[in-house]
Amino acid sequence: MQVAFHCPWPNAATWLAALRARGSEFTFVPWPEVRDPEAIEAAVVWRPPAAILQQLRNLRVICAMGAGVDYLFRAGMTPPQAPVVRLVDPVMNERMASYVLAAVLYHQRQLGRYREQQRAGVWRQVAHRGAADVRVGIMGLGPMGRTSAELLRRIGYDVAGWSRQPRSIAGVRCFAGRDQFAEFLGRSDFLVCLLPLTPATSGILNRTTFDALPEGAVVINAARGDHLVEADLLAALDRGRLAGAVLDVFSVEPLPKDHPLWRHPDVLITPHVASLSNPGTGAAQIVATLRAVQAGEQPAHVVDPADYAPAPGSCD
Ligand code: OXD
């Protein structure tokens, strides 16, 4: 089976080598070297230009090189016959969980404040709440949300989660659906967004959401930039409704140099690093998907296109 490969990342060569080593029965062809698009039966991609997928008319599967697949469902993007499979990787889940923990600790343990004090040579101890008194609310209880909730719970935080379908996680209070959203927000001192980006979740981090949080809450977004209405966040920070934000993802990446978020004292910015895909484990999952497709079987982790259709969809 010939497999087209499109990866704009600096470690693309490592990915290609990992795919070739694990799936030696497949012919992986980096996109610019594809000579006969009709012969390509599978694609392994990260944010490919629409023109690439449109030329691959005989695709049997599209393997996304990350957990989020929203970009593959933009208008005119994905050939309708090809199922999309996303990465579900325990290594990525752990990475996301440690990012969420670090973001919570940064605020809970006043690390930003101490950094400021250090610059001014100030020795002043600041009180902080213990984990049991910190209420963390995680939006999205897919594999990354669940792993994050479980890690925080183990450490002793008061954790809740919110998802479209009711979920059950030991020790975590689970809310579901729009009806329970306000109650969930009302007990979230930290609001963590790990939702997939769908028409139902785009812009969900907005003024109404912020106003439903406890005064002085902190927002953490490690999902997609378009979940957040940036102007609403800046306004909520400026009027003191929110105490801070930790942002890993942005509507435009890299974040433009003149963007006000860069300079806001209450915003901590990281450059989309919360849970980078891992070539070793990622290639293993992708090769398993290709083998399933070649054997005529249904691969694991196929995305439901209905969740990305322009009607209310997934909040997992
Ligand atoms: C992903 C990402 O979707 O890193 O995996 O953004």
Image (cartoon, grey):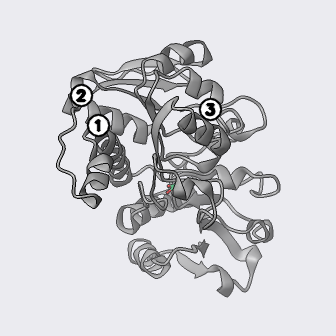
Q: Is residue 52 left or right of residue 271?
A: right
Q: Where is mark 2, residue-wise?
A: 129
Q: Are marks 2 and 1 in contact (CB under 8 Å)?
A: yes
User: Considering the numbered disc 1 on the image, is that residue within a helix, a strand or a loop?
Assistant: helix
Residue 69 rendering spot, x and y as whole percentages: 61, 51
Residue 49 rendering spot, x and y as whole percentages: 73, 69
- Whichever of callouts 3 and 1 sits on the residue coming sooner in the sequence is 1
Q: CA distance from mark 2 to mark 1?
A: 7 Å
Residue 103 rendering spot, x and y as whole percentages: 35, 45
Q: Are marks 3 and 1 in contact (CB under 8 Å)?
A: no
| Residue at image location 30% in from the left, 26% down from the top | 134
- Whichever of callouts 3 and 2 sits on the residue coming sooner in the sequence is 2
The image's mark for residue 83 is: none
| Residue at image location 22% in from the left, 58% down from the top | 121
Q: CA distance from mark 3 to mark 2?
A: 34 Å
| Residue at image location 39% in from the left, 52% down from the top | 89
Vertical order, 131 against 148 (above or below): above
Q: Where is mark 1, residue-wise?
A: 108
Q: Is mark 2 within 8 Å of ligand 1?
A: no
Residue 40 rendering spot, x and y as whole percentages: 68, 73
Q: Where is mark 3, residue-wise?
A: 314
Q: Amino acid at mark 1?
A: Gln
Within 10 Å of disc 1 (Cα), the crowding (few <14, some 14-19, many 20+) is some
Q: Is residue 137 left or right of residue 35?
A: left
Q: Amino acid at mark 2?
A: Arg
Q: Residue furthest right?
A: 76
